[in-house]
Amino acid sequence: MLQATISPPNAILFVFDPANKNVIIPAYVDGELTAANDTCVSVGTQADVDGETDVSLGFFDEAPVGLQQVFLGTIHIPSGRVGIVTSQFQRVLELEVPIGPLAVMIWADDLRMPARIAVQVKPE
């Protein structure tokens, strides 16, 4: 499991294939922690002024202790890499995965402003 501690600008992170030139950032859904389409998932975080956010990325093995699932869906990975990226397109974490559809599960410690987020993936 890859891990990082960051202060994401604009209190949001994105999960997508960083090499995919056709990524479409999903429209924000008021009152929802996540938004998604077939190329990208967005997830809100706590504001950087409130502290850092612990983020992890890895293959699904079991539910992370102390977190609740906030997203389950599928995105397309054309290059064989999935990444967690900031709103300024800074790559935070990247993982090599099979090309094609990828199940994405996102877990968080809070439904509004999480300080701990786990992204787990599973090839379909």
Image: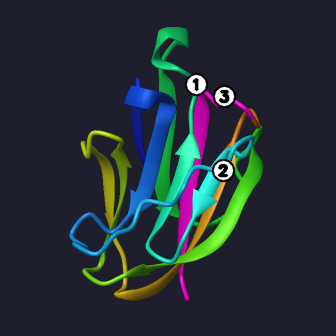
Q: Nearer the viewer, mark 2 or mark 1?
A: 2
Q: Earlier in the sequence, mark 3 or mark 2?
A: 2
Q: With respect to residue 96, does 119 lie above or below? A: above
Q: Earlier in the sequence, mark 2 or mark 1?
A: 2
Label 3 environment density (alpha carbons within 10 Å; few <14, some 14–19, many ≥20): some
User: Residue 47: percent from the left, percent from the top?
Assistant: 53, 20
The span shown in magenta is 112-124
In space, the residues marked 2 and 1 are separated at their CA atoms by 16 Å
Residue 79's disc is: none
Is disc 3 in contact with disc 1, using a CB cutoff of under 8 Å? yes
Label 1 environment density (alpha carbons within 10 Å; few <14, some 14–19, many ≥20): many
**Amino acid on which the number 3 mark rests in the picture:** Met
Question: Which residue in the structure is indicated by mark 3?
Answer: 113
Task: Quadrant for the C terminus, please.
Answer: bottom right
Is disc 2 in contact with disc 1, using a CB cutoff of under 8 Å? no
- Residue 62 seen in render: no
For label 2, the SS is loop
Instruction: Decide if residue 32 is on the left or right side of residue 53.
Output: right
Q: Nearer the viewer, mark 3 or mark 2?
A: 2
Based on the displayed image, in which of its 4 quarters is residue 65 positioned? top right
Residue in the foreground of this view, choosing between 32 and 86: 32
**Amino acid on which the number 1 mark rests in the picture:** Gln
Question: Which residue in the structure is indicated by mark 2?
Answer: 29
User: Residue 93: percent from the left, percent from the top?
Assistant: 33, 49
Q: Main SS of the magenta segment?
A: strand
Question: Which residue in the structure is indicated by mark 1?
Answer: 46
In space, the residues marked 3 and 2 are separated at their CA atoms by 15 Å
Residue for point 35% across, 41% down:
87
Residue for point 72% across, 34% down:
109
In space, the residues marked 3 and 1 are separated at their CA atoms by 4 Å
Is disc 3 in contact with disc 2, using a CB cutoff of under 8 Å? no
User: Residue 122: percent from the left, percent from the top?
Assistant: 55, 76
